[in-house]
Each structure stands twice: as C-alpha cells, then as structure tokens.
Amino acid sequence: MAQPDNYEVRRHGRWTLRVRPEIWSDGLWAEIRDRISETASNKHPRTLRLGAGYYLKIYSPPRGAARIKDAMRNSKAMRALNQTDALSRLGFHAPPVVAAGEERTRGFLGSAFLVTRDIDARPLIQVLRERFVPPLDRTKIRRKRRWLGELAGEVRRMHANGFVHGDLVPSNVFVGFDGKDGAVFYLMDHDRTRRYPRSLPHLLWRRNLVQLNRIVLPGVSLQDRMRFARVYLAKERWGKKERRLIRWLERRTRRRRKECEHIEAKVSFRELMRWNGPFAKNL
C-alpha cells in the first residue's frame, strides 16, 4: 500500500513516527510518552483522552507468535493510519489521524500508538436509542429508514472498493449530522481493516454483515434489517443467490449470539432480534 504523503517520518531513538507536521509538537510527543509509560501492558489496546480534541490509542508489545509476525509487518497503529488515509481519499469518514508511532528493538515491535482528532459524532447505538425507539411518527420512521439505507450504501461502497473492516460492530459506527436532516457515518478502528484487489473474489465481506447484524439495536426491526439488505445488495427482487446469503446470515447471526451472549432459542428470527423482546440484551 502506498504511504500517505501528508505525513512526515521522524525518528526518536527506537521510535519511528509518522506525523502531521502542522499539528505535531514536542509537547504532544512528551505527553504521549508519559501516557505510554504509565499504561500497564494489556492484550487489548487502550484508548485515552489526550488533551483537548485528541484521543490516544496505545498498543502494548505483542506476545507469543504475534511477536514474530509483527517483526515482519507494520504495527497495527501504522496499518490504521494507512487504511484510514486510503478510505478518506475515497470519501469515507473516519476520525482524522494526527500521528502514529512504533517502537522497535532489533526489528522486534514494542509499544505503538495512534493519535486521532475528536469528531463531532456520537455512537450509532446512542443515536438510535435517542431518536428511533417507538412510538414513532411518520417523519421519524422515514428518517430512520433513510439513514439505515445510507449506512447500507456506505458499507456496500466500502466493499466495492475492496475494503473489509476488521470489526464492523455497531459500536464502531458513529453518526454525525450535516445540518440538513442528514446523517454522516464514521467508521472507527481501522487497525485490522484490509484492502483487497477488487478483481480478487473473496467472501470476507460477509463477516462485516454478521458483525453489524448480530447486535439487537434500539428501534431496529426485522423489516429495517431487510431494507438494509436490499440497499446493500442493490436489488429489490432477490434471486437464489441473494436468498441463500440471507439464510446464511441468519444462521451465522444465531451462532454468534450463542457464542457471544449465550443466547440460543428456537424462535423466529424476528423474535430473536426484537429490540424489546425476551432475548434482547438492550444496550
């Protein structure tokens, strides 16, 4: 993947940084190093508020087999920068990356970090709960359907450009507003996002549909999920291929709910995924 050309490479001891020079400062770098030194090692990255308008994501040194793999590839922080930049160039929305850095000793990866700017957006789940939990009038119903259709269109466009998001769960979708009753969707956390040649047939994009589908969402009905699928598939009438995909998606969603939430019920999919139903774990 081509390296973003609006970042400068800087070296500080064992650290290699890629920074936006118009934003970067010695004071910001000092604060980042302090936060990294204060943060205990953890398998999962930690995200911290960093001053006014920034977030810092800290990646601990890899362990086990990952230590060998990361000696031969970019850190997750650098991968997140590259993928966010590539998506932004295509008109997708994501928190702008200010800087990314990785520490290496004899080629082996140590800590890494990613700094992003704050965005004027809120989690999708929060927006759905605040705006679209029944009862709804016709205006709100139309708005909900339009926004979910726009989200489906963004996911379709992302896949059409060869991208597969690493973890496209609803909590990684944020919603901003354009001031004209429209929504702007931000896709978060791109350290595991990958881009594949569009000519290369693969089925990894289906994983994103399962990730989005398996969570019971405030105010989102089975009909809403089917409308999302119609927009995503860009077909009003489905043939055997599309129906096979929908049946597969239901099976995988049931399996993931069993694995992640220990919910297994021999009921209709409508009942299983109903927002205020007995099998929902309301967020």
Image (spheres, rainbow, N blue to C red):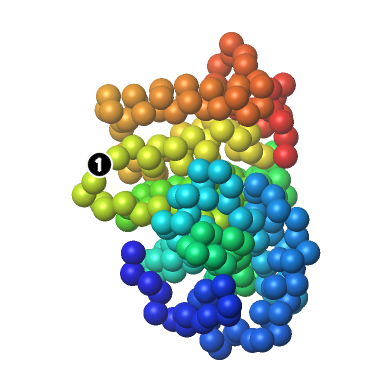
Do we see residue 95 in this rendering? Answer: no
> Does residue 7 appear to the left or right of 38 in the view shown?
left
Q: Quadrant of the N terminus?
A: bottom left
Residue 106 place in picture, x, y as percent: 50, 64
- Residue that protrudes farthest toward the top in the picture: 266
Secondary structure under tag 1 reads: loop
Residue shown at the point (61%, 35%) measured from the top left: 215
Q: Which corner quadrant of the image does residue 207 belong to? A: top left
Q: Quadrant of the C terminus?
A: top right
Crowd band around label 1 with a 10 angstrom C-alpha radius: few (<14), some (14–19), many (20+): few
- Residue that protrudes farthest toward the right in the picture: 38
Do we see residue 54 in this rendering? Answer: yes
Number of marks drawn: 1
Residue 257 place in picture, x, y as percent: 60, 26
Residue shown at the point (39%, 42%) measured from the top left: 205
Residue 280 in the image: above or below residue 219: above
> Does residue 191 appear to the left or right of 90 in the view shown?
right
Is residue 185 or residue 20 the one in the foreground?
20
Residue shown at the point (74%, 66%) measured from the top left: 37
Q: Which corner quadrant of the image does residue 34 belong to? A: bottom right
Residue 125 in the image: above or below residue 50: above
Residue position for label 1: 201
> Does residue 281 appear to the left or right of 270 in the view shown?
right
Is residue 33 or residue 239 the one in the foreground?
33
Is residue 102 or residue 251 the one in the foreground?
102
Q: Amino acid at mark 1?
A: Pro
